């Protein structure tokens, strides 16, 4: 199964403030930029390429806090798993959308692959780091917002080994966000 990261960070590599806030994503960059050519910076194209999503508990709780109406739900009908050893049920507003999984990550990936799923979207800093340490991430798309937070929750935690990022493909958007897609090569 192919496992991909698609995530936004501040220019200094943080995915959230120290308190877990991501409001800065909506205020970073040029607010008056003409984004008609690519208003979601490629997210719809990416989400249409995946058939499941695996996220961490904290990521799920942030999404839950947005209380997204059904008509604005950005993940379509893909199956979503949230990794948690402490929760047994998702938040009430995500009950029909998210399944909690407690257990071995490789077992989950093998189970999903055996079910015929081919492409997983991996989200959440700790979850991404865990997948990298298990050498399961195949590609990463990182969109950098033109903002320095100075502190916060970093995209990557402690890695067990060096990772070589290859075949960089970058896009600069009119709002000053920069997106780079890499293939992942484990050394």
Image (tube, helix red, strand yellow):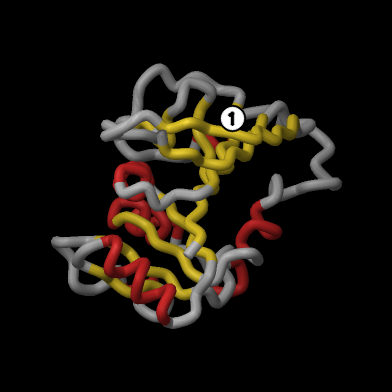
Q: Is residue 66 visible?
A: yes
Q: Is residue 166 above or below residue 148?
A: below
Q: Position of residue 130 (x, y in %)?
A: 30, 47
Residue ID at (42%, 70%)? 80
Q: Which is more toward the observer, 43 or 135?
A: 135
Q: Position of residue 1 (x, y in %)?
A: 47, 65
Q: Which is more toward the observer, 110 or 54?
A: 110
Total marks shown come to 1
Residue ID at (30%, 51%)? 58
Q: Position of residue 23 (x, y in %)?
A: 49, 39
Mark 1 neighbour density, 10 Å: few (under 14) some (14–19) many (20 or more): many
The residue beneath circle 1 is 145
Residue 171 is drawn in which quadrant? top right
Residue ID at (65%, 35%)? 167
Q: Is residue 91 above or below residue 130?
A: below
Q: Is residue 155 above or below residue 54?
A: above
Q: Quadrant of the C terminus?
A: top left
Answer left or right for 58 relative to 74.
Answer: left
Q: Residue furthest left?
A: 86
Q: Is residue 26 visible?
A: no
């Amino acid at each position: 199964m192919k496992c991909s990261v698609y995530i936004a960070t501040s220019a200094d590599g943080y995915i959230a403030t120290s308190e877990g806030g991501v409001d800065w994503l909506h205020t970073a960059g040029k607010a008056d930029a003409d984004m008609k050519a690519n208003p979601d910076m490629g997210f719809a194209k990416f989400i249409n390429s995946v058939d499941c999503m695996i996220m961490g508990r904290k990521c799920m709780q942030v999404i839950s806090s947005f209380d997204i109406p059904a008509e604005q739900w950005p993940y379509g009908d893909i199956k979503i798993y949230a990794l948690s050893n402490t929760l047994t049920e998702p938040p009430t507003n995500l009950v029909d959308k998210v399944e909690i999984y407690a257990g071995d990550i490789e077992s989950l990936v093998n189970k999903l692959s055996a079910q015929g799923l081919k492409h997983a979207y991996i989200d959440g800093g700790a979850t991404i780091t865990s997948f990298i340490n298990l050498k399961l991430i195949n590609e990463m798309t990182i969109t950098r917002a033109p903002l320095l937070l100075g502190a916060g929750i970093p995209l990557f935690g402690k890695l067990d080994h060096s990772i070589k990022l290859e075949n960089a493909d970058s896009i600069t958007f009119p709002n000053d966000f920069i997106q780079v897609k890499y293939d992942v090569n484990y050394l």
